[in-house]
Image: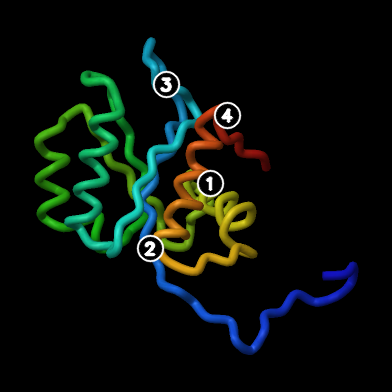
Amino acid sequence: MRPGQIERRTHDYERHGTTTLFAGLIAAVTAETAVKAGSVIGTCMPRHRAQEFRKFLDEVERNVPAGLDVHVVMDNASSHKTKLIRNWFAKRPHWRTHFTPTSSSWINQVERFFALLAGKQIKRGTHTSVKELIAAIEAFISQHNANPKPLGWTK
């Protein structure tokens, strides 16, 4: 690309598959733990259903010390509201759920992380398989978590 030239793709661009990234951003930590504010817990899965979301919640629970209050900010995806997920949260009274209003992804800080991931790792990448794409995503998350910083909102 040259300055002033419009970005484009060749006619033979081929998509080699997709993955679903479930991710949680640790926005703040108010107790002494190994989990740092700004860290991301992420898992790639082949589909975006309640079963996969439940597996992701189990992963978050394994990574967050027991007894801490956990606030989960989610969009209104149908996979976040099923009976399976409601029952999972009902058994964990120290987990609190918050749903963002429709068309308000800017409220959910993990969406900002997704934008960073897309812009810095995926957008211009040439991934020839889903396995390669997942490896790139996991590498970005590991790199981010090596020196995590909480995201700050500015007006």
Tag nearer the camera, 2 or 4: 2
CA gap between label 4 and label 1 equals: 11 Å
CA gap between label 1 and label 2 equals: 17 Å
- Per the rendering, the mark at residue 65 is none
- Per the rendering, the mark at residue 113 is 1
Q: What kind of residue is marked 3?
A: Val
Query: Label 1: how many residues lie within 10 Å, few (<14), some (14-19) or many (20+)?
Result: some
**Quadrant where the N terminus lies?**
bottom right
**Which residue in the rendered view is the most extreme toward the top?**
32
Q: Does label 3 or label 1 sit earlier along the sequence? A: 3
Pinpoint residue 20: horizontal percent, then vertical percent. Answer: 36, 60
Q: Are marks 3 and 1 in contact (CB under 8 Å)?
A: no
Q: Which residue position is annotated with label 4?
A: 149
Tag nearer the camera, 3 or 1: 1
Tag nearer the camera, 1 or 2: 2
Decide which of 100, 39 is in the foreground and name it: 39
Q: Which residue position is annotated with label 2?
A: 19
Q: What kind of residue is marked 4?
A: Lys
Decide which of 35, 45 is in the foreground and name it: 45
